[in-house]
Every structure is written in structure tokens, then in C-alpha cells.
Amino acid sequence: MLWSDPKDEPPKDMRDAQAMLRRMLVVLVLAMVIAVYVLGVPPF
């Protein structure tokens, strides 16, 4: 690979979208855990 080759990474807007989706997933998982705890439903 040459030093002049473009970097193999997605564009900035795609990286931002991936980061936003990752944060939304973490919030969703935390909300599910809190909901299970509040409702008293056994998780398994």
C-alpha cells in the first residue's frame, strides 16, 4: 500500500451515524433493563 492511497475508512457522516446508532442501542438496552427491574418481570 502506498502512502498516497486513500484511507480505508467510511466518510464522516457515516461514522457519525454509526456512533449515533451505537449510543441509541446502549440507551435502549439500559431502558429495557430498567423496565424489567421496575415491572419485576424475571428476565429469563
Image (tube, grey):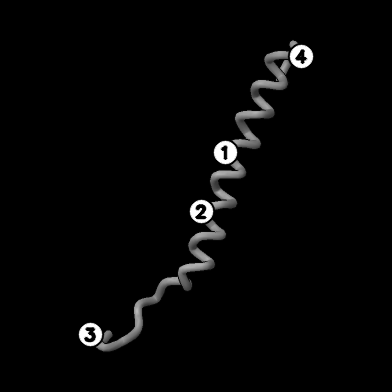
Mark 2–mark 1 distance (CA, rounded to whole Å): 11 Å
Mark nearer the N terminus (2 vs 3): 3
Q: Where does residue 28 sit, x and y in percent of width and height?
A: 65, 36
Q: Where does residue 3 sit, x and y in percent of width and height?
A: 23, 85
Determine the secondary structure under disc 3. loop
Mark nearer the N terminus (2 vs 1): 2
Q: Residue furthest top?
A: 40
Disc number placed over residue 39 in the picture, else none: 4
Disc number placed over residue 3 in the picture, else none: 3
Identify residue for label 2: 19
Determine the secondary structure under disc 4. helix
**Dot 3 crowding, Cα within 10 Å, few <14, some 14–19, many 20+:** few
Query: Which residue is nearer to you in this view: 33 or 15?
Result: 15
Mark nearer the N terminus (1 vs 4): 1
Q: Which tag is nearer the camera, tag 2 or tag 3?
A: 2
Mark nearer the N terminus (1 vs 3): 3
